[in-house]
């Protein structure tokens, strides 16, 4: 079986067009909703296990760092062990002396989890 590059591009385009949200929409919507949660509920999303159950993601939904972190420390904090950025400060918010960065690794399989959670917290 031979796969032509255009066929792969067409398949990827089709899959992406079937998504409920793009990654930016997910990050914006979730970040906004998180700011309305109680401290206890927000802290749950700093845990990998809770984030996996709720959104089917491999890392904690948010990364929490002290507000006194320098820009350099913030940028280092969002990297995984291989040096890849796994979080973004684009949708950061502050609460109780901490800054929260948003998880960036979203896939089509996560969309239904995002949709369900957003409906539950609305």
Image: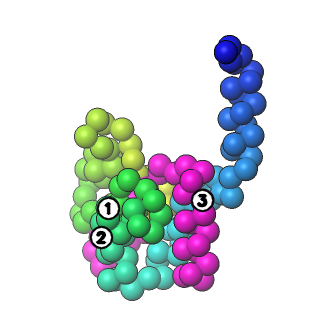
**Disc 1 secondary structure class:** helix
Residue where numbered disc 2 is placed: 98
Q: CA distance from mark 2 to mark 3?
A: 28 Å
Q: x%, y% of residue 59?
A: 35, 55
Alpha carbons under labels 1 and 2: distance apart: 18 Å
Q: Pointer 3: what residue? A: 111
Q: Which numbered tag is attached to residue 48? A: 1
The mark that comes first in sequence, 3 or 1, is 1
**Camera-side residue of 48 and 94:** 48
Residue 27: percent from the left, percent from the top?
54, 60
Nearest to N terminus: mark 1 or mark 2: 1
Q: Note whether 38 is above or below 30 in the view shown.
A: below
Q: Is residue 24 left or right of residue 98?
A: right
**Disc 1 versus disc 2: nearer the observer:** 1
The earlier-in-sequence mark between 2 and 3 is: 2
Q: Give residue 11's quadrant in the image.
A: top right
Give the magenta part as a residue range.
93-122
Vertical comparison of 100 with 42: above or below: above
């Amino acid at each position: 079986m031979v796969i032509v590059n255009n066929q792969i591009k067409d398949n990827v385009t089709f899959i992406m067009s079937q998504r409920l949200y793009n990654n930016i929409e997910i990050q914006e919507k979730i970040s906004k909703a998180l700011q309305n949660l109680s401290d206890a509920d927000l802290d749950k999303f700093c845990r990998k296990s809770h984030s996996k159950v709720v959104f089917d993601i491999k890392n904690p939904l948010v990364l929490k760092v002290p507000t006194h972190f320098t820009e350099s420390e913030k940028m280092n904090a969002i990297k995984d062990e291989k040096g890849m950025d796994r979080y973004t400060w684009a949708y950061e918010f502050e609460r109780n002396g901490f800054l929260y960065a948003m998880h960036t690794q979203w896939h089509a399989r996560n969309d239904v989890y995002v949709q369900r959670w957003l409906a539950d917290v609305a």
